[in-house]
Image: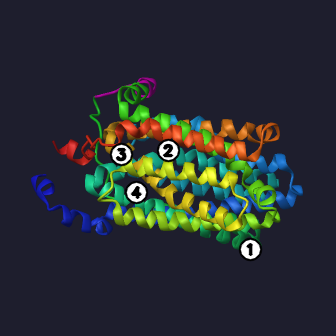
Amino acid sequence: MEKNKSAPLSEKESSIFKNPVFRAIIFSGLFLQIGIWVRNFAVLLFVMERTNGDAFAISMISVAEFAPIFIFSFIGGTFADRWRPKKTMVWCDILSALSVFAVLIALIFGTWKVVFFATLISAILSQFSQPSGMKLFKMHLPESQIQTAMSVYQTVFAVFMVLGPIIGTFAFQSFGINISIAITGAAFLLSAAALTFLPKDRKLVEEADKTTLWQEMKSGVNYVLRKKELSLLGLCFLGAGLGLGFIQPLSIFLVTERLGLPKENLQWLFMMNGVGMILGGAGVMIFAKKVAPQRLLALGMLINALGLAVLGLSTNLWLTLTAEFFNGLMLPCIQIGINTLILQRTEGAFIGRVNGILTPLFTGSMVVTMSVAGMLKEQFSLIAMFETAAFFFILGMVFILPLYNQKAETKSLEIQQQE
């Protein structure tokens, strides 16, 4: 233990890519992203083909993807705190693969409508697996490496924001729905295989210390309310979710109404946003040791607010593309800042529950404003919607300003255990 504490910082930082836990989670994430994007686009294109573009059927895909976040995120986070993280992640990937292969069999011999379950079941299982991954980062990485690790992890997601739709569309158009679903199942199994290289789970709590699920859920809520940093972070989540919900369904109208271009040009906005995300994730990796996560988060919220304001007002294609690029560039600052803050300011025993409380705050508020965005646009204007979204991002930034000059307080779970 003393050796671990006294190791030079530069030695610790240089070893992050040699860390077997980090490598296993990154490789697992790569396989998962391939499976998820192939599944999502194969299901989307298949349902559009079978229903002739029925809006209700297509919307049910989003319901299958987002509903588990509301229903299972807090429950999954609580169980993630009770269960061994490696075993939880491996079994979630195996069960996801088995459910996907079961859907494939049903597709071949039964009805095509079971395809929705390929998204639903793996989305439910991810609510148990994802907080376990964060717990492993907390356990096995020193404090100085956490933000760098989250930067790399987020960059993987950013790369797939650009490549994912291409890979998913290619798989469906080249091989059809059956092979695409089989590829998804194989990717989940490869993710489970990558996770077997994680070190053996250690006991996180004393076996004698038995509490009920309800008691642990209640203690998780009390923990968030008691910790000022986490409560403020929750309010920041709320502001960002409300803002994103206002503009998430309306991007197409930037192209058709504000720019007066055919709807197909929306792809260029997405592409600029995706390129910005990749560069932003790489930039945070480089500067992770120098910039505190709360400052990253505040900067990201501010620049995104300005970007949204410009998007709503712009009638020039290049100005719109530039705003999209900067929004994408700053989005990793928000995501990495939030995840790093959660890991730094949360004790290891509460990681799952804190994640399970804060994530639905963001998603729930986003879905609320998404559901009324179309109606409000008809009553007001596209400009008003984007400026309102910008206001909510500013509001979210204001909530976390009290944390701006604070320093991390919690130690890694591994050191806590040893002490």
Q: Distance between the residues labelled 2 and 3?
A: 17 Å
- First in sequence, mark 2 or 1: give its number: 2
**The residue positioned farthest toward the bottom in the image shown:** 174
Query: How dense is the environment of label 4, judged by Cα within 10 Å: few (below 14), some, or many (20 and up)?
Result: many
Quadrant location of residue 290? bottom left
> Does the residue at mark 3 contact the one at mark 1 (Cβ under 8 Å)?
no
Q: Name the residue under label 2.
A: 128
Q: Would residue 63 be visible to someone looking at this image?
A: no
4 vs 2, front mark: 4
Residue identified by numbered label 1:
175
Please tell me which of labels 4 and 3 falls first in the chain.
4
Residue 180 appears left or right of 348: right
In space, the residues marked 4 and 2 are separated at their CA atoms by 19 Å
As drawn, 21 above or below 405:
below
2 sits to left or right of 121: left
What whole-number distance in Å separates the C-alpha atoms at marks 1 and 4? 34 Å
The answer to if 109 sits in the magenta stretch is no
Given residues 194 and 157, the one toward you in this image is: 157
Query: Which residue lies most toward the right here?
Result: 52
Task: Measure the alpha-carbon separation of dots 4 and 3.
Answer: 10 Å
- Name which residue type carries label 1: Phe
Q: What residue type is labelled 3?
A: Leu
Which of the 4 quarters of the picture holds residue 17?
bottom left
x, y (%) of residue 392? Answer: 58, 39
The numbered mark, 1 or 4, whose residue comes first in the sequence reads 4
- The label shown at residue 150 is 4
Q: Is 37 situated left or right of 288 in this image?
A: right
| Residues rendered magenta in the picture | 209-218
